[in-house]
Amino acid sequence: MTNPILADWRTPFEIAPFAQISDEDFAPALEQALASHRAEIDAIANDPDAPSFANTVEALEASGEDLDKVLSVFFTVAGADSNPTREALQREFSPKLAAHYSEISANKALFRRVADLWERREELDLTEEQQRVLMLTHRSFVRAGAALEGAEEERMKEIKARLASLGTAFTQNLLADERDWFMPLAEEDLAGLPDFVVDAARAAGREKGAEGPVVTLSRSLIVPFLQFSPRRDLREKAYRAWAARGANGGATDNRAIAAEILKLREERARLLGYDNFAEYKLETEMARTPDRVRDLLMQVWEPAKARAEADAEAMTEMLRADGVNGPLEAWDWRYYAEKRRKAEHDLDEAALKPYLQLERMIEASFACANRLFGLEFQPLDVDLFHPDCRAWEVTREGKHVAVFIGDYFARGSKRSGAWCSAMRQQAKFPKEQAPVVINVCNFAKGEPALLSYDDARTLFHEFGHALHQMLSNVTYESISGTSVARDFVELPSQLYEHWLEVPEVLSEFATHAETGAPMPQEMLDRVLKAANFDQGFQTVEYVASALVDLAFHDGPAPADPMAKQAEVLAGIGMPHAIGMRHATPHFAHVFAGDGYSSGYYSYMWSEVMDADAFAAFEEAGGPFDPERARALEENILSTGGSKEAEELYLAFRGRLPGVEALLKGRGLVAA
């Protein structure tokens, strides 16, 4: 029988037939797909005809369809609904895939064909998009080590395979720590907690099979617990467990893995002729050099640190008033910040949260996309990989644009955080294909599900990534959607967050879960006024993580990453009561793969642009200005990686921004 993963998918819009796929199908499907792809690559490399764009670059673009199907399904479920079988498969697949792609990049005959085209590029009569694809194809071969020979070539293959295995191990160790730890709460421990936190704790207890409510290491539960619990001892216990993920000793400890990853990355960069991994990694980004990254981060660090230190003094006085004589600690910050927010802005998250229903925030994100880009969303009744998942058909003027899948709730089988991925990317070659895009989040379940303001911002953020995929309009899949520089990819997502704060959006969609009444105007005013509350803390915890990431890669790899982390934090004067947003042992952005390695700064680099880009709407006809929306789609959302990021932004805005708009947007300078 044909493996259901590799069969034709006779489902609505060719969505993966999850109901027909079992875990036993993945390994044989991968082997078959790898063999098929290998045969396709061999045919391209050994084509007797002279190299042409069609028989080499376009042939590469068209290859690997079966492999794409296998990996899109597998990595979707491995990240969002894992189990021991899938975790074992991931450990098995990682080195195989690394070896497979190393084999392609090391194929000398294939590289000679690509290099020949690159040398003759001026005489090939290529379109602008084809020129871009040729450049990126040639560059990816060179950066992957295609020009290496002999022992260096073999060593590069070994490094890639080992890095793939280590990244998988890092991810699975972190998932295990997050899944296995929970703190039971007695009924008296619930005192002072708002109903939505109690409900989330009871739901988590049921999921864990506990007899009562529990606190888990899911951000959507532990953060509100740290905000509201008056029990300092329980806050400390929960925070220490959260901070210790990946650093608990034993089989799930990630510290040695991080050290080996950094050492191998440095060796990989040196094999390719770079002084260090940061120089290698940043060469293809907007930032270009480690110095430019550090300069941006330090411009933001100083005002953020000053704001955080002033806030710490105010909260230390509150701590004293509660009879605590010791210093303000990391498990105190969110609790006293919430008290302070309520006092200074008369804004109580427990009172605010009923107005931020998940359903209504999904509707809000769709409605903004409709007003800006004319997109419409119709629910689809299809089998997906988990009962929590939902799907919509996305259309414009009656024409199919994409399928959008939302998987919003936290569960033990899902890795932490939130992300967007395309199970199928938009392309016109070798055939027209519309994207299938998924947003994965970790919100607490409830009846109804209620979001914090940060949760709502996360939902809009990930949907901004989804729009980048759904509105893509290029020919070749390799430059489709979010296939852009890492420090540009966060621009559409962070820009979309701004529409959550548009007063008319909240007025329409922030309705009370029980009464259906809209958020009162005075509460709406307070929400918007408090939007920058605690930005010193949020900026410090982020920038500290970005500076540590950069320090890990800009120079010799540290033998002891934890010592290097401590050195960096001491050097910048990290406030005592603020922890890094992602400490090394659970810094999945950096160690689960190469994606954000030496690139965690990207969020802030993109924020410099997103603050300026939203200002362009405000300077025009307002947040839904049709001309600005059209310019955004035409120059950024539809173009993928068809041009350099800087060129795309200049086409949209006419100039590049400075850091001033970011500082003003975060309230770190006077307006």
Image (cartoon, rainbow, N blue to C red):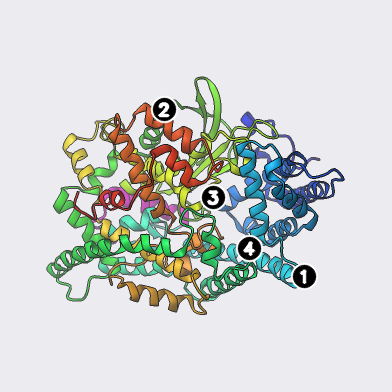
Q: Quadrant of residue 190?
A: bottom left
User: Sequence order check: which comes first, mark 1 or mark 4?
Assistant: 1
Give the spatial CA distance, label 2 vs label 4: 40 Å
Q: Main secondary structure of the magenta part?
A: helix
Q: Is residue 413 magenta?
A: no
**Residue matched to label 2:** 370
Q: Position of residue 385 (x, y in %)?
A: 58, 43
| Mark 3 secondary-structure assignment | helix
Considering the image in quadrants, where does the N terminus appear? top right
**Residue matched to label 3:** 80
User: Sequence order check: which comes first, mark 2 or mark 4?
Assistant: 4
Which region is colored magenta?
189-209
Q: Residues within 10 Å of mark 3 (few under 14, many from 20)?
A: many
| Mark 1 secondary-structure assignment | helix
Give the spatial CA distance, label 3 vs label 1: 40 Å
User: Sequence order check: which comes first, mark 3 or mark 4?
Assistant: 3
